[in-house]
Image (spheres, rainbow, N blue to C red):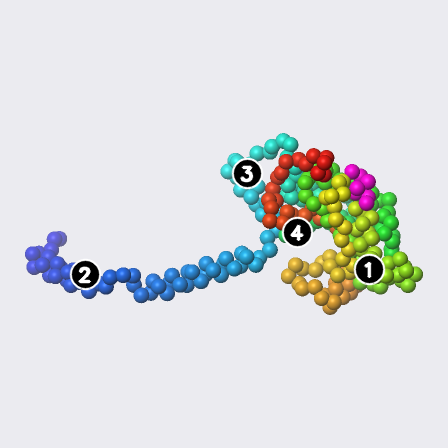
Amino acid sequence: MGMTAAEKKAYGKGFSAGEDSVEEGLPGWFGTFADMMTLLFAFFVLLAAISTIDPVKLENMADGMGKSVGKKKEIENQAMSLGDIQKAAQKMVEEMAADPETGEKPVEVSTSPKGVTIGISSDISFQSGSAQTKPGFLDILKKIIPTVEQSYFQIAVEGHTDSDQLPKALRVKYPSNWELSGARAAAVVRLMISLGVGPTRLEAVGYGEFVPRDRKNTELLSTDLVQKYNSNPQQKARNRRVEITFLAPRGGPVGRAETPTKDNQ
């Protein structure tokens, strides 16, 4: 039903009065809302800046997104990416037999912002208090070498020990666990060089007992923390290890690259 002439006239007067009463510019609440959104944006930018990003997980996510839209293609003559290295190492571990006593595999693979780490139990790598590798360690290392040859990343070999003090007789050669862990890392580096790995790609680091295997990334290192993760024989056995880490480039790409030549391997 339509409006009468009188209703139309009244409606017109009301509309004109309302139009004249509206102030120019944005409503007052909008300024507060804009300030809040700006602060939220700054907060999330700060979170992103202080967070640690796992380059392997980031790369795998990017690869998955690329496959989903049909853009990712395998190109010949390319070096392995960190994601490829992780997959190859995991496959190697799956094919290994577990320790009959502990039920654990002698090798573990992990990722972190630092890169891809292959951890090898020191109990199957070295005699107690010695930097001389056991025969079985060479077999494990030979399985890792093909992955090294097909990648271009720098490699850090890190030696770790438990918190037990070395016997007095051994302290003549290794005054502390620092020297023992460093000597073990250097021994592995020399072995890798003998297997054809370029020495310019390698670095040897000894951490002694000060980087326990099960420490969480959010935990700050301290003497108390070291003792916490060396409180029983099982933890000490896990801490005695050698780690081979394929290092993520600092500030560089973590994806594929051209296969390196023998000159820069």
Q: Nearer the viewer, mark 2 or mark 4?
A: 4
Label located before the other in sequence (4 or 1) = 4
Give the amino acid at mark 4: Lys
Q: Secondary structure at mark 2?
A: helix
Q: Which residues are magenta?
A: 190-196
Give the amino acid at mark 3: Lys
- Return the x and y of residue 116 as percentages of the image width and height: 68, 48
- Tell me if residue 148 comes above or below residue 173 in the rendering: above
Give the amino acid at mark 1: Asn
Q: CA distance from mark 3 to mark 1?
A: 47 Å
Residue identified by numbered label 2: 19
Residue sitting farthest toward the bottom: 224
Residue identified by numbered label 4: 114
Residue sitting farthest toward the left: 5
Q: Secondary structure at mark 3?
A: helix
Question: Quick one: label 4, few (<14), some, or many (20+) residues within 10 Å?
Answer: some
Image quarter (top left, top right, bottom left or bottom right) of the C terminus: top right
Label located before the other in sequence (3 or 2) = 2
Whether residue 25 appears in magenta in the rendering, the answer is no
Residue identified by numbered label 1: 177
